[in-house]
Image (cartoon, rainbow, N blue to C red):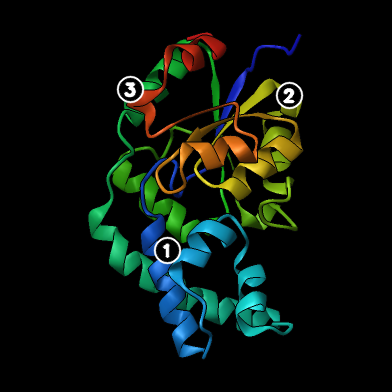
Amino acid sequence: MRPHPLAAVFDMDGTLVDNMRFHGMAWERLARRLGSPATHQQFEREWAGMKAGEILRILLARPVPDTEVARLEAEKEADYRAAYGPRIVPVAGLFAFLDRLRGAGYRLALATAAPADNRAMVLAALGLEGAFEVTAGPERAARGKPFPDIFLAAAALLGLAPDRCVAFEDASNGVRAARAAGMEVVGIATGETAARLRAAGAGHAAPDYESLGAETLASLGL
């Protein structure tokens, strides 16, 4: 029998906040400037959770030096922050759910491909700067999602085996990454459908935290 989870590991974009369309449109604007036909739908459905360098290699169809990655990533992320910064709101039910997890003794962690400036913007706007015990960002992972590196890094920072953690994810790549790390997954269907998240490996899925069903809550001991 699988041990009861001791920690909840959250993705950020699309999971704490419903912002993936803003990322997608920023990537599409950069792609147009670079002469690529890539669309925001490709980012939102195929590339979500990947590191910037991985996405840029797809857009440009060539190796991209680190200096170029840094410059283009900074351009895209500044565009995204300008567009999304004034619109930040939590996914419905997030605050009450975090309180419920803490009340049940869960430790909380963040596992996200978002760079530090994006994390700081979102967490500050939500008032969650101190809510997560540890953060595993792209700087701690050699590979982005769907590889398990970011989730394995979060578990290591917590000092827990991955199978003592449950992950919360909005994207198929993130679900696959958490499952590859050995975590159970609850899908938050802000962008992709619940059916797609389950097909990727999520054991449970709902549109938001207010909609988590009794079976899901019971599986979490809530």
Q: Secondary structure at mark 3?
A: helix
Q: Amino acid at mark 1?
A: His
Residue 96: which disc?
Answer: 3
Q: How many marks?
A: 3
* Image marks 3 and 1: residues in contact by CB distance under 8 Å: no
- The quarter of the picture where the N terminus appears is top right
Q: Secondary structure at mark 2?
A: helix
Locate residue 205, reporting x and y percent: 49, 30
Residue 54, picture quadrant: bottom right
Query: Would residue 12 be visible to someone looking at this image?
Result: yes
Residue at 68% across, 51% down: 146
List the residue tagged with mark 1.
23
Q: In the rendered image of this protein, does residue 36 appear above or below residue 51?
A: below
List the residue tagged with mark 2.
163
Locate residue 155, reporting x and y percent: 70, 33
Please state if 29 lies on the left or on the right of 163 as rendered: left
Residue at 49% across, 81% down: 31
